[in-house]
Image (cartoon, helix red, strand yellow):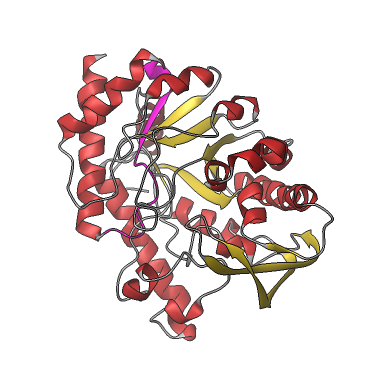
Amino acid sequence: MRRGIPPEALKKEVTQMVTKLLPTTVVGSYVQPEWLIDRESLKSRLPPRVRAIELWRIDPVNLEVAKNDATLLAIRDMERAGIDIISDGEIRRESYSNHMATALDGVDIETPGTAIDRTGHPNPVPRIEGPIRRKRSIEVDDVKFLKANTDRKIKITLPGPFTMTQQAQNDYYKTDAAAALDYAAAVNDEIKELFAAGADVVQLDEPYMQARPEIAKQYAVKAINRALDGVGGETAVHICFGYAHIVHSRPEGYSFLPELNDCAAKQISIETGQSALDLKILKHLPTKKIILGVLDLSNDVIETPEIVAKRIRRSFEYVQPERIIVAPDCGMKYMQREVAFGKLKAMCDGATIVRNEL
């Protein structure tokens, strides 16, 4: 709670902030400090699918406190930039997916399997050896920490069930579709607890739907809908072309996107900043809010607010402004902090320019 502001005034301020046109958010990750994690080692490898505790620079006794301190830095940067709906920056994670994927029963992380990454290279992954079950909360404490340390609306991310299935070696289920549905059930349990803990938005990260569209067309939407079954809060699905640091080329368009109009998520997160995506495809998502990626994360050039404004305006031919949420293309994990902050500030200023035109 900010000092000197009456609770009633603060509540009104927050309500106005999240009901305004073109609210701003982040996709998920933010920059982890060099003193917390070995960033060079992190950037030199594929995103970890199993635990990679060797990346942390802090001794185990003090690591949790250090992660909390770094999370506070991320929160304050997002607030200073003007972000309306913030995340915890995924500061506590080695990658967007391994934090949850390695915390489930039924997977062996001591003798991992291997799966081909979207780059075409093999990567150690959890090996499914039994029924996938969630026996404990995984990110609930992260939500509680975030909610206790900001007045903004808060968002938390989880790896989606399709992507977790693609990032595992299945040695138990007869089909990957069956594995995906059990992953989805575990995600469903987690989502419900995240909303109960105070999350305003829960987002499923599903980059592998774009990477493997033919497989995704078989069961991805079914798995997402199982993950969101009975969930009443604001939910999102993020689908992208991969971290710009890892996957350098961008296709001309999405190979899996119109299908998501049939999923239960209320928001669909896409990237357009780097790819200059043909936005006609958004006509196929008439029932969804669009988290519009407008920051190119493939370079360190900080966009001007005018460039961001232009990228936002492009969407209005196909989507009403009331359905647009402004965001970076993807997670900002691999960027330098000053660049990431500068880009977020420009994004918020660009959204203000367009908002004032409406």
Name the residue: 66% across, 43% down. Answer: 215
Name the residue: 67% across, 40% down. Answer: 220
Give the percent coordinates (x, y) of residue 252.
39, 33
Front residue of this view, candidates 114 and 54 = 114
Q: Residue furthest front?
A: 120
Give the percent coordinates (x, y) of residue 122.
55, 67
- Quadrant containing the C terminus is top left
Q: Is residue 181 left or right of residue 265?
A: right
Q: In which quarter of the view is residue 266 placed? A: top right
Magenta stretch? 320-335
In the rendered picture of this protein, how many numbered marks are placed on residues? Answer: 0
Front residue of this view, candidates 165 and 157 = 165
- Answer whether residue 225 is visible to the viewer in this image: no
- Answer whether residue 86 is visible to the viewer in this image: yes
Q: Is residue 11 left or right of residue 204?
A: left
Name the residue: 51% across, 55% down. Answer: 118
Name the residue: 32% across, 73% down. Answer: 40
Give the percent coordinates (x, y) of residue 74.
34, 57
Q: Is residue 101 left or right of residue 27?
A: right
Give the percent coordinates (x, y) of residue 259.
61, 28
Q: Is residue 192 above or below residue 11?
A: below
Q: Is residue 67 shown in magenta?
A: no
Q: In which quarter of the view is residue 309 placed? A: top left
Q: Is residue 321 shown in magenta?
A: yes
Front residue of this view, candidates 237 and 241 = 241
Q: Is residue 274 above or below residue 47?
A: above
